[in-house]
Image (cartoon, grey):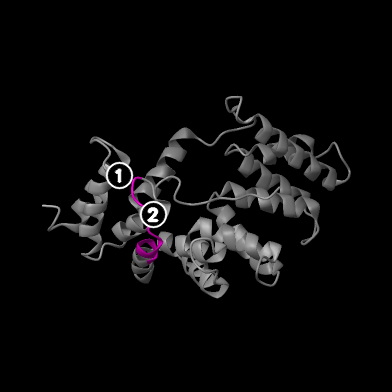
Amino acid sequence: MEAENPYAAYFLGKLYEKGQHVAQNTAEAIRLYTLSAEQDNDFAAYRLGKLYLGGTGVLKDVESAVRWLTFAADKKNQFAEYALGILYFKGEDVPKDIPKAMAYLKQSAGQGNQFAQYRLGKIYLMGEDVPKDIQAALQFLTAAAEQGNQYAQYTLGKLYLMGKDVPRDKDAAVRWFTLSAAQGNIYAQFFLDHMDSFKDPSVLLAGTRLLHHMSRIFSDNTPPLKPPGPHIDRKRRLKLNEKKRAAGHAQGDHEQTMSL
């Protein structure tokens, strides 16, 4: 049946890839994804690209990864566009190509991909391989933050509190930090807890960096602590994850980075 129905092959492939209801079998997942992708299923092509790129359960094959990701991106798959954007921006597995990376990231962001929006915001904010552009940074970071991206929310909170690249706005800073902390971001919570303790926000920034450094030192020897402050509703989190899975975007597909 899966040979005739690309969607059946895709969903069966996901079961074998994740080991859900069946024994995990990456080789079988790849066979089924390939059947589906060859019938123009861009989500199957995306999963193939991610498997070959990650080399998990299969020999890493960058050429095949790029081929399948490009196939999916050509069909406007926002997750494949994001993956290719990161791939070309980092330049680790393929030659670095900033124009191509930015084009893919913008295509993905234009489809509402919050991870692409966040990454573009950070790129423009830091002036990383492109001219620094605060307005573009704010546009992309705000778009991601409004979709609930805790890292974008944290970054905006820090921007408005520090008042370096944008006019200082404590109310806006508190609002974004609160939203980020509600999702368990301990650094956003740190700012909220100590915001009125120091006149100079840069002292707080140094504190978050120390907190991050200490957490890395002890992370190998202690179980993770539940972050302070309010938490995102469990049902809402499950609903968000289910929406991502339905779109072919599994947990761990994206890469979030947060500078302190």
Q: Which residue is found at the position 38% from the left and 46% from the top?
A: 56
Residue type at mark 1: give it: Glu
Task: First in sequence, mark 1 or 2: give its number.
Answer: 1
Residue 109 seen in the current view: no
The range drawn in magenta is 57-66
Relative to 71, is 123 on the left or the right? right
Q: Which residue is found at the position 39% from the left and 65% from the top?
A: 66
Q: Give coordinates of residue 147: x percent, y percent.
A: 53, 53
Relative to 235, is 148 on the left or the right? right
- SS of the residue under disc 2: loop
Residue nearer the viewer, 47 or 145: 47
Q: Which residue is found at the position 77% from the left and 61% from the top?
A: 166
Q: Gap between marks 1 and 2, in whole Å?
A: 16 Å
Residue nearer the viewer, 186 or 139: 186
Circles 1 and 2: CB distance less than 8 Å?
Answer: no
Q: Give coordinates of residue 238: x percent, y percent.
A: 42, 38
Mark 1, Cα crowd under 10 Å, few <14 / some 14-19 / many 20+, is many
Magenta span includes 208: no
- SS of the residue under disc 1: helix
Magenta span includes 62: yes
Residue type at mark 2: give it: Lys
Q: Give coordinates of residue 60: x percent, y percent.
A: 39, 54
Q: Which residue is found at the position 25% from the left and 48% from the top?
A: 27
Q: Give coordinates of residue 210: x percent, y percent.
A: 76, 38
* Residue marked by disc 2: 60
In the displayed orientation, state which residue is furthest to the right: 199
* Residue marked by disc 1: 17
Relative to 196, is 147 on the left or the right? left
Location of residue 235 with respect to 74 vertically, above or below: above
